[in-house]
Every structure is written in structure tokens, then in C-alpha cells.
Image: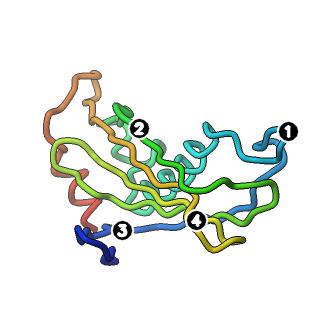
């Protein structure tokens, strides 16, 4: 766990990082990343985070539970451009009633934040029924 400094100190539970270069197909005519692609970068980091605790779609619990994105948010802080090196961090911020994953995308080329955001995931049982509390098996994997 890494402590996040700031006025409201929060714990970054099981933080992972994914790095890549902004590809040409992610930019517009001004060579600036289209705003919707930030969610794709979040998704890459979320997949790495879920895999780090065996909660990815192909893992053993996948037959018993499913995650459903119920909320997503992105706050842009600075543009990413074609060729920029990017790092997106993802960590669990909450897991009691829904799984809340927070993100920070950093422009490594300019050494500044590009965006931050979160996604909230509801848990469904194998029949697709909404669970109002995260199952103990999932919590155990998150806490590692």
C-alpha cells in the first residue's frame, strides 16, 4: 500500500501501473488524445489491477461472480499528445458495497498529471442478481 499525500490522506490498496506510448490512432487532427480514450487507458490499468488479485474475467471466481461498471468518471488535467509516454496507476479505494477503483494518468514526457478518475463496479452473482455487499471471496483476494 502506498499512502497518497494531500489534505485527505487515502490509502492506495494494491496499486499497479501500466505504461505505454500514445499511438497515432488515439489522437485527432491536432495530435491531441480524444477525451474518450482516457477511459481505455483506465481500462488497461483496471485489468492489470484485477489480474494482480486473480479477479480478471478468466480467473476461477469468474464462474461465480461478475463485475458490472455502474459509474465512471474522468477529470482531465492536461492533454496527452501523439508520442507522449504515459503511466496509468490503478488502485482499490473501496470494496464494501461496490468495488471502487481509482486512477491517475501521468504524462511522463512532460512530468505532469494528465487525468484522474474512477470506476465503480457492482457485483452480480452467477444468475445476474445484484449483490449489495461485496462477497467475502472477492474481498479476500483484494486484501491479498
According to the picture, the residue beneath numbered tag 3 turns out to be 14
> What distance separates the C-alpha of mark 4 from that of mark 1?
22 Å
The image quadrant where one finds the C terminus is: bottom left
Q: Mark 4 highlights which residue?
A: 106
How many numbered tags mark residues here?
A: 4
Q: Is residue 17 above or below residue 129?
A: below
Identity of the residue drawn at 25% across and 68% down: 10
- Tag 3 secondary structure: strand
Label 1 element class? loop
Position of residue 61 relative to residue 129, above or below, is below
Q: Earlier in the sequence, mark 2 or mark 3?
A: 3
Mark 2, other Cα within 10 Å: few <14 / some 14–19 / many ≥20: some
Q: Residue at left 23%, top 54%?
A: 94
Along the polypeptide, which appears first: circle 2 or circle 4?
A: 2
Query: Is 22 placed left or right of 87 in the picture?
Result: right
Residue 106 lies in what quarter of the image? Answer: bottom right
Label 2 sits on residue: 72
Q: Is the residue marked by circle 1 packed among few (<14), some (14-19), or many (20+) residues within 10 Å?
A: few
The correct choice, above or below, for 117 with respect to 84 in the image is: above
Residues under labels 2 and 4: Cα distance? 18 Å
**Relative height, residue 119 to residue 103 (above, below):** above
Q: Position of residue 135 (x, y in %)?
A: 18, 45
The residue shown at (81%, 54%) is: 82
Q: Nearer the viewer, mark 4 or mark 1?
A: 1
Q: Which residue is mark 1?
A: 29
Whichever of labels 4 and 1 marks the residue nearer the N terminus, that label is 1
Q: Mark 4 falls on what kind of element?
A: strand
Amino acid at each position: 500500500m502506498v499512502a497518497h499525500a494531500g489534505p485527505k490522506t487515502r490509502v492506495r490498496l494494491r496499486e499497479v501501473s501500466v505504461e505505454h506510448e500514445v499511438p497515432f490512432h488515439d489522437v485527432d487532427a491536432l495530435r491531441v488524445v480524444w477525451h474518450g480514450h482516457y477511459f481505455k487507458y483506465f481500462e488497461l490499468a483496471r485489468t492489470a489491477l484485477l489480474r494482480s488479485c486473480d479477479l480478471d474475467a478468466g480467473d476461477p471466481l469468474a464462474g461465480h461472480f461478475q463485475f458490472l461498471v455502474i459509474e465512471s468518471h474522468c477529470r482531465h488535467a492536461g492533454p496527452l499528445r501523439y508520442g507522449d509516454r504515459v503511466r496509468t496507476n490503478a488502485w482499490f479505494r473501496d470494496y464494501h458495497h461496490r468495488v471502487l477503483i481509482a486512477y491517475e494518468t501521468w504524462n511522463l514526457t512532460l512530468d505532469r498529471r494528465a487525468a484522474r478518475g474512477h470506476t465503480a463496479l457492482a457485483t452480480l452473482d452467477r444468475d445476474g442478481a445484484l449483490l449489495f455487499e461485496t462477497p467475502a471471496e472477492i474481498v479476500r483476494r483484494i486484501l491479498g
